[in-house]
Image (tube, helix red, strand yellow):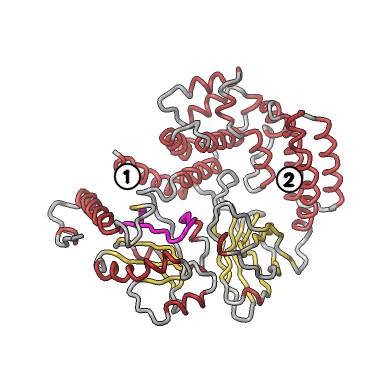
Amino acid sequence: MKTLNSIILRLLLILITLGLQANTTVVQAESVRLHGYADDYAGYHIEFYRYADYITHTRELMGVVMVDSTGHFDYSFDVSDVTYAFLDLSSYRAHIYIEPGVEYEVTLPPFRPRPDADRFNPFYQPENIELGIVNSTGCLNEAIRNYDIYFNSVYHKNAIDMVRSRNIKKSDEIMALCDSVAAEQKCEHPYFKQYVKYRGVQIFVTPRLRSVRTVLQQKFVDEEVAYEVPSYWDALGLIGQSFIASHSKTRHGSALKSVLGYKPPSFADLSDALVGDTATFRNTALREAVLLKGIYDGYYTGYFNGGLTDTLLITATNQALCEGSRKIAFDILQKKNRLKPGTLAPDFVLLDRDGKEHTLAEMRGKFVYLAFMHTQNYSCMKDIPALSSIQRKYKRDMIVVGIMTDEDSGNIDKYFENKKIEWTLLSYNYMQSVVLDYGVESLPTYYIIDPEGRVAVSPAPAPTENFESTVAGEMQKYKRESLRKRPQKERSIYDIVNYSY
């Protein structure tokens, strides 16, 4: 049954992806150029990201910037709207608001390596800084920085008290102070005005968390959903948190409560249950955004089980009326099921010691035994010799790939200088986000990927554990699935190869 469910989910994800691509609205994009000099980062590859959405905060790679041996870098890419972009620089996370058609000369902070003890600590938070801008690019980044410095200091100091005492007078005072700081910036950029507006809504909401309908009616229902404005989602997130669970218990949520009794309800059922409350939910995009936040919270708080969550999200990708809602639903579905057996394994572009690029996509057709390792980790050093013997034994049907997570590539060269290896050795430095894509929190970590690029075993056993029996079972399972898809007369390599262990 688990195998059947994973196949169904996989097919649905493929169909959803194709559907989203077919319905994507083409928006005119303009080129953005970032360039500068940072000798501390000479030879490094720096990845620029954005958030795919502000519910899941899923990273979306915008580009990889190569810093040459002299410390210079120059990179151009296209964006359609003002975009919050960020880059991880070891101990720092630097951010910048990028406008279409603008050129930025930027500076990077002095390189400060992250301690090895924190490199795979899932709770580690890098220091958040603004990316330095040398040339004149308008008021946007400076205005947001100055405003946020004041907002963060006054809001976080008073937020708990406003929630506990429902101190509306205090929130009004803080809003007035923040508005005066915003006015001092003398920035007329539309994005800045929108950003400030929803920071004000965040202050307005804080003492009114028990009056969700009132807040929605006064501050959201007549506004467009600001998909690319972080402050909008910060404000909406305060009232949308666990919305479905809480609203269904109120007298205004009786229709929603009734729908939740269906087995199982669809996303359209939930949306229709709210349509009758026209004063609050006449805005379709808002209604769908609040529901998606509620589904997301509902799953991670245990209010919805995994099967119901999948049903709601899959139907949302088809039934939601707004393109932005369909995309968010797909993002949540992908995050929820990331790295589960049967789902597509994240692709990567990484370099070997000769500077040759390798991708997971190019390895389709064979199983991949994927290992994340470090040359100074004792368990990794113990497992490394076994990788060559595995590659020799399974060379016809499997590629063994070791991704070394040493920040200094020189350590990799030094460690393997006099070692003969028969597997594919890659460094993660060209695309460090690969460790995030695969959820690596400790070393070594292993995965088995099937010939169609799907996760087969997550996590997989180490080469010195019960690897042989596990991989043999996966190959036999893949053989059975492949035979069901092929004409009976057709034979595969699995019909003539017998693995012993």
Q: Residues within 10 Å of mark 1 (few under 14, many from 20)?
A: some
Residue occupying image coordinates x 15% and y 56%:
490
Residue 7 — which label? 1
Q: Earlier in the sequence, mark 1 or mark 2?
A: 1
Residue closer to the observer: 57 or 322: 57
Q: Which residue is mark 2?
A: 194
Q: Is residue 299 above or below residue 420?
A: above
Residue occupying image coordinates x 28% and y 70%:
389
Name the kind of residue labelled 1 in the image.
Ile
Where is residue 149? Give x, y as percent.
78, 51
Residue 256 falls within the magenta-colored stretch:
no
Where is residue 465? Give x, y as percent.
32, 58
Helix, strand or loop for disc 1: helix
Q: Is residue 491 above or below residue 295?
A: below
The secondary structure making up most of the magenta span is loop
Label count reads: 2
